[in-house]
Image: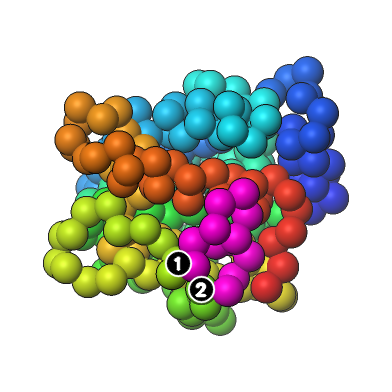
Amino acid sequence: MNRFAFFILLLISLTTKAISPVKISLLKYNGGGDWYANPTSLPNLIEFCNKNLNTDIDPDPVTVEVSGLKLFDYPLLHMTGHGNVVFSDQEAENLRTYLIAGGFLHIDDNYGMDPYVRVAMKKVFPELDFIELPFSHPIYHQRYNFVRGLPKVHEHDGNPPQGFGLIYEGRLVCFYSYESDLGDGWEDQDVHKDSEEIRQRALEMGANIIQYIFSGSKLN
């Protein structure tokens, strides 16, 4: 699927309630990391977006493998976990092709993923480095306004949350939320016992990511 086709698909979903709802996919990867962490997070985020952004996203996310052609059927890949991430040469090339063609990858560090995912993504884009996005970046200012960037969901090491990006030819192709743990905030309330305020802010930031991607405005 080329970039133009992605844009048309996403625009239809956001503005006209497409007959066939867009699906969001969870990325399954090798290396031993728990790619399947936070099983209720994506369904809850989708429900929130359909209610508050008037999107028509299929309520059931799908799982896709890095190496598969099914990757190209979905405009958004969500990736999470706590541990190791390994991409083969073929997987790295497939993911690179997907992202260059117009796809988008959101990586959410569930704690402990950082040293591995940086190496894995360097294999995908050897010429790029993650850069921290400024608080003025549009991804923080969609339906909901985050003047200080990502919300802090879980303390972990007590560091401030950071949002990093990979920018290819002027387009943000990957957003990496670090020391925030958005996915935990999207999960059912009884899983992590987060306050409703924290969950709401996490869902709002997730909705911003969705709206940013679906609007087709992934420049800068």
Label 2: state its secondary structure: loop
Label 1: state its secondary structure: loop
2 sits to left or right of 139: right
Residue at numbered disc 1:
149
143 sits to left or right of 33: right
Q: Which residues are magenta?
A: 136-147
User: Where is residue 151 shown, x and y percent of the image?
Assistant: 37, 58
- Per the rendering, the mark at residue 135 is 2
Disc 1 residue type (three-letter): Gly
Instruction: Identify the image quadrant of the C terminus.
Output: bottom right
Queried whether the magenta region covers residue 137, the answer comes back as: yes
190 sits to left or right of 164: left
Please determine whether, in this image, residue 165 is positioned above or below residue 152. below
Q: What's the residue at 54%, 58% (across, down)?
A: 145
User: Where is residue 187 shown, x and y percent of the image?
Assistant: 31, 33
Please determine whether, in this image, residue 105 is positioned above or below residue 60. below
Q: Are marks 1 and 2 in contact (CB under 8 Å)?
A: yes
Q: Quadrant of residue 12?
A: top right
Residues at marks 1 and 2, CA–CA distance in whole angstroms:
5 Å
Disc 2 residue type (three-letter): Phe
State whether the magenta stretch is mostly helix, strand or loop: loop
Which residue occupies the foreground of this view, 115 or 210? 210
Q: What's the residue at 80%, 41% (across, down)?
A: 11
Which residue occupies the foreground of this view, 133 or 66? 133
Please determine whether, in this image, residue 12 is positioned above or below residue 168. above
Q: Furthest residue to the top?
A: 19
User: Where is residue 17 shown, x and y percent of the image?
Assistant: 76, 25
- Per the rendering, the mark at residue 157 is none
